[in-house]
């Protein structure tokens, strides 16, 4: 597809296209009780939209640009293990955690109320 947008969410920037799904760490605007399956989301932090040869760049975000999508399912990522050892002191500490992530699909990209194809 020749139409895509660059959004900022979860502390990272993503290049998104309509109809594709993406994995992100968290949405800052949603609480854990709102992160259910088929929850519709609107992302207003759109940095850039490209449609064929036309490029719109925001400073820092585009006004009137919205990326509409929905959450497919939340999940936990692989476990990260942290092991700290101080030699000659008999000190060892093993910790770990699993980060919460979610998979969402982009339904459409809008600029000034018009859907971009």
Image (spheres, grey):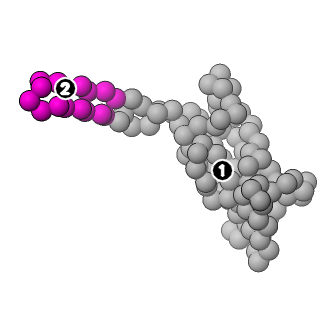
Nearest to viewer (mark 1 / mark 2): 2
* Residue 20 is inside the magenta segment: no
- Residue 90 percent across, percent down from the top left: 12, 24
Q: Residues within 10 Å of mark 2 (few under 14, many from 20)?
A: few
Closer to the camera in the image, 111 or 116? 111
Q: Please give the range of residues in magenta.
A: 81-96
The answer to whether residue 14 is visible is: yes
Q: Is residue 60 left or right of residue 75?
A: right
Residue at left 17%, top 31%?
86
Q: Residue at x 68, y 53 (%)?
A: 7
Camera-side residue: 1 or 41? Answer: 41
- List the residue tagged with mark 2: 92
Place of residue 56 in the rendered image (x, y in percent of width and height, measured from the top left) = 79, 67
Label of residue 8 in the image = 1
Gap between marks 1 and 2, in whole Å?
39 Å
19 and 77: which is toward the camera = 77
Residue at (73% x, 49% y) in the render:
45
Taking the image as drawn, is residue 19 in sight? no
Residue 49, image x, y percentages: 75, 63
- Labels 1 and 2: the sequence-earlier one: 1
Q: Quick one: quadrant of the N terminus? A: bottom right
Q: In this rendering, would 40 be left or right of 15?
A: right
Q: Secondary structure at mark 2?
A: strand
Q: Quadrant of residue 52?
A: bottom right
**Residue lying at the far left of the rendered structure:** 88
Q: Secondary structure at mark 1?
A: strand
């Amino acid at each position: 597809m020749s139409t895509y947008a660059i959004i900022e969410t979860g502390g990272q920037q993503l290049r998104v296209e309509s109809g594709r799904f993406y994995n992100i760490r968290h949405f800052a605007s949603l609480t854990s009780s709102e992160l259910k399956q088929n929850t519709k989301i609107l992302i207003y932090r759109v940095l850039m939209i490209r449609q064929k040869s036309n490029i719109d760049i925001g400073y820092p975000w585009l006004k009137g640009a919205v990326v509409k999508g929905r959450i497919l399912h939340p999940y936990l990522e692989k476990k990260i293990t942290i092991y700290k050892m101080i030699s000659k002191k008999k000190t060892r500490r093993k910790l770990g955690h699993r980060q919460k992530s979610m998979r969402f699909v982009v339904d459409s990209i809008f600029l000034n109320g018009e859907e971009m194809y």
